[in-house]
Amino acid sequence: MKNKTLLFAVAVVSLWTASGCSKFLDLTPISVANVNAFYKTGQDAVLAVNASYNNLLDLYRGEMWLLGEVMSDNTDDPDASIDNFSIDANNGSIESFWRRLYSGVSRCNTVLNRVPGIAMDEQLKQRLLLEARYLRAFYYFQLVQFYGDVPLVVNEVVSLDDNLVARTAAAKVYELIIQDLTAAEGLPVSYEGSNLGRATRGAAKMLLAKVYLVQRNWPQAAAKCKEVIDAGTYTLLPNYADVFTVASNNSRESVFDIQFSVGAQAGTGTFPGNNFFENFAPLGSASLVTGVNASNPGGRNTPTRNLIDAYEPNDPRLAASLATSYVRPGPPVQTITVNYILKTLDPTATAGGIGQGSREGWRALRYADLLLMYAEALNEVSGGNAEAFNAINQVRRRARGSAAATVLPDLAGLNQVDFRSAVARERRVELAFENHRWTDLVRTGQAQAVMSALKPTFQARNLLMPIPQRELIVNSLLSQNTGF
């Protein structure tokens, strides 16, 4: 059946399994099964929830960095339509982003409709349902931030007519997101073994705090951050550069990592690792840059001079995050001047496509981000109080490491306006290339001023993405965002 629907799931669902793997998200297709025949056992429920996580891999390998970083002042990219805001409703990345997110929503809705009727271990059932609610909230949070009002679908799609849904006011979408995340606070604090990487209580609370930040509900944002801090589950790793290694997957700084794996699983095929090490490497740099190991370096997501200038003098995070040149061996020996990301380089990665790549997870939510969120929210509640300064200075001290005290000195004595600017700068350099910059610019009201100064093609309409033209064609109830 040719799929022309909004949610790309009608009467069948792609099912994925982690059987025999060291990572629960080592996913490989085993069948396309009729949902009525499938949702019978506890194992079926586990596989269906695993499938709901699978969309995260595609999102982070695909459009998240394009929309989170390239569209901002942090990076440039050969994809001029995104980089230069010459975006229209037929843009392939904008359409793909929408499809992947709604596919994730659809999988979660099917789980939430079907799993309650399965006779299985009740504790496991409740956990799986909460994981699905967390993931649905995650997907809807991206949709509402990038597209504004979007169709709100909360039940399983069982017919084509179910996809004819008008756009729902963003405020209503946020209501569902908050309900789902509040429920997901009942998830386990942590997991072990093959369950590492699943959504946790801390991930639900932190994502909820982000939602409150977007809504400018500062007291609630601060309260949720404080709950995560007081739980003591997470901490900053001693060395900033160590956060971005395979060895630090699911570390105590990671609140929610996107899981990647590589290699073959007997009898079921191969798993794709992440491709960032290759995609973001300088063009022509194969085997010349430590950690590239790339067969076809992409030269994508290139750090801007504007970002480099945002780092304070001697900030160790600059050298840990990006490089500005590499040496091409001779004869003649040449120093090639080019900016490229170091955070995603992985010396253990292997290039070559499916079954190859890097096992390094993507730090979707991490503790340093939460501390800066806490500092920001507290400052908006009551100015830069002692707790706010302590939170931001924890991040700066870890970044400083063993450098002299004059490097990244503790902040003190800032008024509310200056503290607000300090947090914004700290977030930019601490979280560079982690897909937070664009949404930070938009939610703080800085996007139009910042991007207009850098990109003459930027227009107010670009604060939201266009609704994909293909979706407007297949769903007559949809309307387009202003200006497109």
Image (spheres, rainbow, N blue to C red):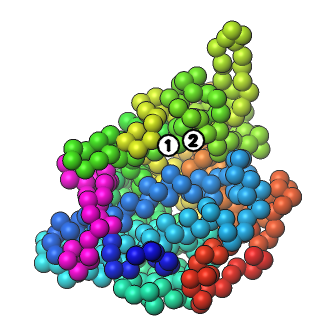
- Furthest toward the top, the residue is 331
Q: Quadrant of the N terminus?
A: bottom left
Q: Quadrant of residue 348?
A: top left
Q: Where does the image place residue 423, in percent across and percent down from the top left? A: 66, 54
- The answer to whether residue 172 is magenta is no
Q: Foreground: 68 or 164?
A: 164
- Relative to 82, 106 lies left or right: left
- Relative to 225, 480 lies left or right: right
Q: Foreground: 312 or 109?
A: 109
Instruction: Please give the label number shown on residue 275.
Output: 1
Residue 482 visible somewhere in the drawing:
yes
Q: Secondary structure at mark 2?
A: helix
Q: Magenta residues, as a range?
A: 14-39
Residues at marks 2 and 1 touching, judged by CB atoms closer than 8 Å? yes
Question: Amino acid under label 2?
Answer: Asn
Indicate whether 171 appears above or below 103: below
- Relative to 158, 469 lies left or right: right
Indicate whether 137 appears above or below 169: above
Q: Where does the image place residue 345, in percent across and percent down from the top left? A: 52, 34
Q: Quadrant of the C terminus?
A: bottom right
Instruction: Please give the label number shown on residue 279.
Output: 2
Local crowd size for mark 2, using a 10 Å CA cut-off: few (<14), some (14–19), many (≥20):
some
